Image (cartoon, rainbow, N blue to C red):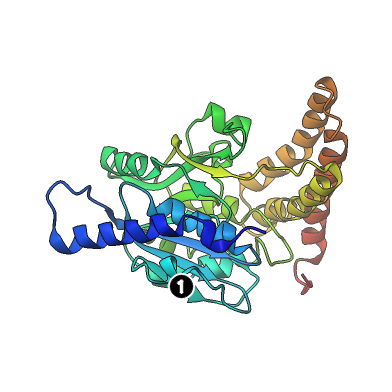
Amino acid sequence: MRSANSVGAPFLSRRNMEVNAHRHAGIPGTPPGLENVQVVINSYGRDVWFVERAIASVLRQKHLPSAIHFIDQNDLPIALSTSLQTEPLIHHHHFPSKVGALARNLALHLVPTGWIAFADDDACWVDDYSEHLLRLLREDPSLCLIAGAMLDEKTRRFYTLRHSIGGKLNSFTGSKLLYGANFVVRAETFSSVNGYDPRLGPGTVWPSSEEADLCWRIIISGVTCRYDRDLAILHPAMHSSDARVAARKAHHYGIGKGALAAMWLLEKRHRYGLFEYIEMTLVPMVNMIRGLLRCDLAQLYIQPAQWWGRQRGFWTFVFRRNRKLET
């Protein structure tokens, strides 16, 4: 079994001493931190090894944020290793709740100004993440939302074809570039759209697409958005090697995507809802055909499950949106 303390605890201890010494002594030439950036990592039911790995990837950056807010959603607080408990940048907030959107919305109060960097509890920032983020913030002061890329932690390949191609973030198609595991948003922008919709995402009846909903609301507000493929994180593979497990996960997440399309069609009466329904219906069919041509037989399990989950979520929301549904 992996030990939580195996996540480079000695390295973090040395780093703590060096960073604190530089801050208090004002040593000339010390790389400036991202003083106007605060990181938010929320976690529910995750192995502490992954959580500490995620936090450690932020602490080993050349440019450090002013704070790392670890929002612990577990019923019993996670016991972080001693080196992390004594790290002054880390603020451990115990917030027992299964709903990820509610946990992330704590940022509305924790980070009233500056930038919020949302990160996943099972992902890692690449070693030069902070350098690319600092470059982006300096290049365009008008930016309000930045989405970064996701790389498979084993193959180092882009998570999706869209991420490898890139494009502009401020459109329906471009919004597919934003993943909740890796984006940075102005605190004022996050507050202006009232943060996440707590009806969507992990821990809810509609267990995904909370980040797409947030992205769309930010896009239509008219602020400047950007995707940058160099602002990358390492993340576990999208699908399990077991096709049946991957199919169940695809169906589960598909329910949230279907609900998102229905929500934007019926409640917001916005064209993005129609666009999403068309795409979510056609794309699994296209991917299944691609899987057949490539002899990737796992897609025969995954894509139909995904298609059915999306349709189920859409029509369940249409007919039962005014009723209380159990998670």
**Quadrant holding the N terminus:** bottom right
Q: Amino acid at mark 1?
A: His
Front-most of 308 and 59?
59
Image side of residue 108 versus residue 314, left or right: left
**Quadrant holding the C terminus:** bottom right
Q: SS for tag 1?
A: strand
The x, y position of residue 302, in whole percent, is: 82, 41
Front-most of 215 and 70?
70
> Which residue appears at 74% of the width and 65% of the height?
205
Front-most of 66 and 108?
66
Mark 1 Cα shell of 10 Å, populated few (<14), some (14-19), many (≥20): some
Image side of residue 121 versus residue 232, left or right: right
The x, y position of residue 134, in whole percent, is: 31, 44
Front-most of 197 and 222?
197
Image side of residue 101 versus residue 231, left or right: right
> Which residue appears at 28% of the width and 61% of the height?
17
Q: Where is 221 relative to 287, above or below? A: below
The x, y position of residue 236, in whole percent, is: 63, 45
> Which residue appears at 51% of the width and 56% of the height?
7
Can residue 211 be seen from the camera position used here? yes
Res. 275 image quadrant: top right
Q: How many marks?
A: 1
Res. 18 image quadrant: bottom left
Disc 1 designates what residue? 92
The x, y position of residue 222, in whole percent, is: 42, 47
Q: Where is 272 relative to 160, above or below? A: below
Can residue 220 be seen from the camera position used here? no
